[in-house]
Image (cartoon, rainbow, N blue to C red):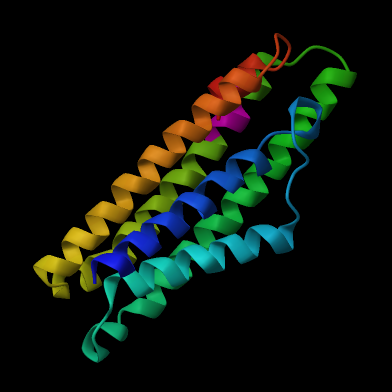
Amino acid sequence: MLKFVVAGVTALFVTASLPAYAQVPSMMGPERLSAVDLAKLTDARIVIVKAALQLTPDQMKYWPAVEDALRVRAQNRQARLARLAETVGKAVSDAPIDPIDFLNRRADALAQRSADLRKLADAWQPLYKTLSDEQKQRMATLTLVALHEMGNALEQRRMQGDDDGEWLAIIQ
């Protein structure tokens, strides 16, 4: 059992760190991953979470809503990042950034993230109520590992940024 959790956490480390590079516009670092690659990473994350939880047949009836919410959130995030990369490209090549337009776009992006997180929380709630203490512990461990990896990825992006692109790390 411990080997399974360790394998899942290791796989999560690998899959959680790759999208950090995918988020960096090409002018600031490694090339962005394709939509197909990002979809494969999302699939891998979903498989890891599902496998780590070892859901019972009764719990499986709640899983489709969770999986759908995870996929929608990943798709919306990918779309936000694509819009951001496009905006950064225009800002670098065109006139200065309009701060009001920037604030409005940022507010829209945060509203979308909020809606996605709410949908994810709503989808998880019925399943979470049915999890055993052991399953809840595994879910907590996966969550902590993912949060740690996101923090590391953000720090890496900040360290890679140059003077012209440092604001990008701040707004993401």
**Res 85 quadrant in image:** top right
Residue drawn at (14%, 67%) of the image: 134
Q: In this view, does 125 lie to the left or right of 104?
A: left
Residue drawn at (43%, 51%) of the image: 115
Q: Residue furthest right?
A: 93
- Please identify the quadrant where the N terminus is shown: bottom left
Residue 168 is situated, as x and y percent measured from the top left of the image, at 63, 23
Give the answer, above or below, for where 126 lies relative to 36: below
**Res 47 quadrant in image:** bottom left
Residue 136 is situated, as x and y percent measured from the top left of the image, at 18, 63
The main secondary structure of the magenta stretch is helix
Q: Residue furthest left?
A: 133
Residue drawn at (46%, 59%) of the image: 11
Residue drawn at (46%, 68%) of the image: 46
Residue 121 is situated, as x and y percent measured from the top left of the image, at 31, 58
- Please identify the quadrant where the C terminus is shown: top right
In the depicted view, which residue is nearer to us: 1 or 105? 1
Give the answer, above or below, for where 135 lies relative to 107: below
In the depicted view, which residue is nearer to us: 58 or 72? 58
Asked if the stretch drawn in magenta spans residue 35, the answer is no
Residue 67 is situated, as x and y percent measured from the top left of the image, at 44, 71
Q: Which residue lies furthest to the bottom in this view?
A: 57
Q: What stretch is highlighted in magenta?
A: 103-107
Q: Is residue 100 left or right of residue 87?
A: left
Q: Residue furthest front?
A: 3
Give the answer, above or below, for where 17 lies relative to 71: above
